[in-house]
Amino acid sequence: MLTNLLPVWTISFQDETGSQTTIRGTFKSGYTAAEYIAFLGDLAPKVQQITTCAVVRYAVTYRMKDTDTGKPNTRLPNTNLANFSFFLTPDPTIYEVISTPLLPSLLQTTGPLAGVAVDLTQSDVINYTDEITNSIWCDPFADDIGSIYTAYAVSVV
Amino acid sequence: MAFSILPAGRLSYSLVDETGTDGRMVIHFPSSQLASIVQTNALALAPLIQAISGCAVRGISYSYELADPVFAAPLAGSRVEDKGRFLWALANGLSSKIEVPGIKPSVVLTDGAIDAADTDVTAFMDAIVAGSAYSGIDGSDIVRVTAAYQAFRRSTKGMLPSRRLAV
């Protein structure tokens, strides 16, 4: 059960040597992202006045968390990963790669790419790629993600 | 300061497999989208990720980020380890802490306390207390500052200079 947590604000600083650090705090709920950003836009120059560092970045982060804490929580990455490459709608010669854990049963079982390529005809895979293609998702430059190009397994050791 | 919002926000799913091992999936969304719409879409995608990964979604976080591509140069002698530690009283009786890196020497008194009469310090503290949106980790109101002083943090390996001896 995913539950909303309070939004978090962060402000990042850089000193003369290039070292960076980030401070964070909590926002009350009930404001829009634009309002949170406006609060930070007011705070950032005031922090700048009392620090020798440069304020380089600030952000508001919304969080949801599964409140079930009964599962172990290690820091190791999942070893069964797949990279999904999508065409970008504005420029189909550029791709956006999204990496996600993948069930081994969704890999192709025949042909030259057996065990490597993701079987894009499986219904669960189609549902996943269609949702990414048809929803709000984009690349880091806000270019809309288009149709799936290819997907393949990645080994992490 | 000329901060502008990055064109795309970053959304991250925290995943966990049956062994308890963590995984992560990152995707972006246009910053022009409302948080409520991002959350609706994120929740719609979550079960589809679970269907192809077999992992459980333990958490979702998404950020709107602003950056200054031509930020002013840090002042000479600035070090992020040199903190101005501000302690705040919360309405529920608990406390909260904010540490401003590279606190200006001009706002630190000779005994290490931060000069609460300095107008820049006052403006910063007022923005937190009277800002209405800032809170403690449990959402409790920040009522007032209870202490403000200089504090130093140990340098991490990444903060140490690459040149260890000038010859």
Image (cartoon, coloured by chain):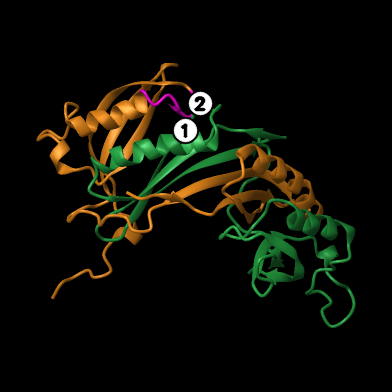
The C terminus of chain B lies in quadrant: bottom left
- Residue farthest along the front direction in this orientation: A90
Of residue B90 and residue A13, the one placed in the foreground of this image is A13
Please tell me whether residue A94 is drawn above or below residue B124 in the rendered image.
below
Q: In the figure, A123 relative to B59: above or below?
A: below
Residue B24: give x, y in percent of width and height: 63, 54
Q: Badge 1 sits on which subunit? A: A
- The residue range painted magenta reads B130-139
Question: What residue appears at the point 67 percent right and 40 percent down from the top-left corner?
Answer: B37
> Where is residue A16, by image quadrant?
bottom left
As drawn, A43 above or below A129: above
Kindly indicate which chain is depicted in orange in the rendered structure.
B
- Residue at the outermost left position: B110
**Badge 1 is on which residue?**
A26
Q: Is residue A67 visible?
A: no
On the image, the x and y values in percent for residue A3 come to 66, 33
Residue B118 belongs to the span the image colors magenta: no
Q: Which mark is residue B138?
A: 2
- Secondary structure under tag 1 reads strand
Q: Position of residue B121 (x, y in %)?
A: 23, 32
For residue A19, what is the image quadrant? bottom left
Answer few, some or many: residues within 10 Å of disc 2's Cα (few below 14, many 20 plus, some between 14 and 19): some
